[in-house]
Amino acid sequence: MANRVTATEVKAIMDEVTLADAVIDSYISGANTIVTDNLGSTTLSVAMLKEIERWLAAHLVAITRERTAKKEGAGGASIEYTGEWGSGFDSTSYGQTAIALDSTGTLAGLTGKSASIYAVPTTY
């Protein structure tokens, strides 16, 4: 499926992003795949899917290239990022917003996904 959002739309919700549009487009493609595969068959409107894709694209940029620093250092080389972060989509304010926009709860469920293996004992 074609991307629902543009790099300009993603940059509009991010602070001081310096990445080229072509780079942001690659993150949009990833967000598009997540939205299409997990939310494409839900009852969410086209407008809502677009908005979720925008926030997920910003999340993908933020977790890899554009983290927001709260405090930086020099001599002791330390950095502290803003916000309260969890894992997965909860690790940025953009991902948290995408989860909040998803009224189906699907994205929230993806954050805590884990696999389990059970052994079934057999008797002979």
Image (cartoon, rainbow, N blue to C red):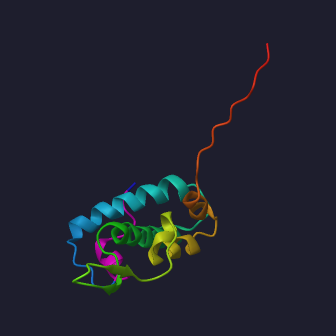
Quadrant hosting residue 116: top right
- Taking depth in this image into account, of 91 and 95 the one nearest to the observer is 91
Residue 108 relative to residue 24: left or right: right
Q: Residue furthest right?
A: 123
- Taking depth in this image into account, of 47 and 84 the one nearest to the observer is 84
- Taking depth in this image into account, of 13 and 89 the one nearest to the observer is 89
- Which residue is rendered at x = 47% and y = 78% of the image? 93
Q: What predominant SS class does the magenta segment belong to?
A: loop
Tell me if residue 49 is in the magenta stretch. Answer: no
Quadrant hosting residue 19: bottom left
Tell me if residue 39 comes above or below residue 69 in the rendering. above
Q: Residue furthest top?
A: 124
Q: Position of residue 20 (x, y in %)?
A: 20, 71
Q: Position of residue 86 (x, y in %)?
A: 52, 70
- Which residue is rendered at x = 37% and y = 62% of the image? 3
Q: Position of residue 89 (x, y in %)?
A: 49, 66
Tell me if residue 53 comes above or below residue 72 in the rendering. above
Tell me if residue 88 comes above or below residue 114 in the rendering. below
Tell me if residue 115 comes above or below residue 47 in the rendering. above
Q: How many marks?
A: 0
What quarter of the picture does the N terminus occupy? bottom left
Magenta range is 2-14
Tell me if residue 7 is in the magenta stretch. Answer: yes
- Which residue is rendered at x = 76% and y = 21% of the image? 122
Residue 85 relative to residue 104: left or right: left
Quadrant hosting residue 124: top right
Q: Position of residue 103 (x, y in %)?
A: 63, 70
